[in-house]
Image (cartoon, grey):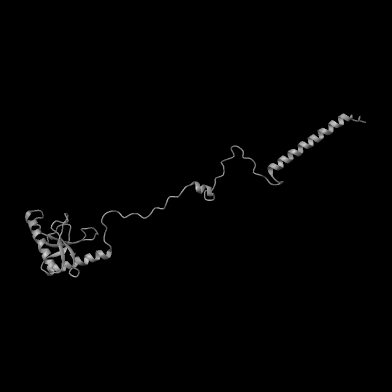
Amino acid sequence: MDPEPEPGEALDARAAVEAAFGAASGAASRSQATSGPAGAAGPGPREPGSGPEPAVDPVADPAAERDAGPREPAPGPREPAPGPRRLDPPAAAALLRLAARVERDLLASGLNAKPYEVTPSSLAGVEVEVDAFDDAVGGVWLHWRTHPSVGSEGSGATSVRVVMAEALVRTLTALGYRVEHGDDSLRPYAVRLVAGPDTAV
């Protein structure tokens, strides 16, 4: 038979067992407090090098939307380009009707009349120009075109154009039109048609 332990040795063995049991219980309690209830895995601390922090959705995060500051206003309609603009279709159509009427009346009066041509033609007479813009020189203009044999820049052509401009003013005034000598530097010796017989005052 084994000899019985001395009373001091029994007390020392019992204290060692209790200390070991207490250490195991404390470790189990700390593990449960870290991981949560039994069977539930907690996130735990992030380890270095495990990847970037998850991104925050700016739409779902009101703080991110506030930090973005005020939004830029939407661009408005473009401003129209400066300078004269074309007349609207009804106003342009009214000018074309007036030009056609004055051509007919001049032909009936014995003067050759036709629409304006940028390139000089061999046909002398009155050319009717329609300027369909809304600026100060828009409207219907009458030009006296001389025959090429007279020349376009000589003193003879200038004298003819001055005389015929006055003749146009007098003729159209007699027909009931309201006309005036033009003051546009790009249309020397031209006559401007202000209004037709039905609207002349």
Residue 41 percent location from the top left of the image: 67, 45
Image position of 61 (left or right of 166): right
Tally the numbered discs: 0
Quarter of the figure that contains the N terminus: top right
Q: Quadrant of residue 45?
A: top right
Image position of 184 (left or right of 81): left
Name the residue: 16% across, 65% down: 178
Q: Note whether residue 150 is visible.
A: no
Residue 99 percent location from the top left of the image: 19, 65
Residue 57 percent location from the top left of the image: 53, 48
Quarter of the figure that contains the C terminus: bottom left
Residue 34 percent location from the top left of the image: 68, 42
Name the residue: 53% across, 47% down: 63
Image position of 198 (left or right of 156): right
Image position of 81 (left or right of 109): right
Q: Quadrant of residue 31?
A: top right
Residue sticking out furthest to the left: 156
Q: Nearer the viewer, residue 73 or 106?
A: 73
Residue sticking out furthest to the front: 201
Name the residue: 70% across, 42% down: 33
Q: Note whether residue 19 is visible.
A: yes
Name the residue: 17% across, 63% down: 193
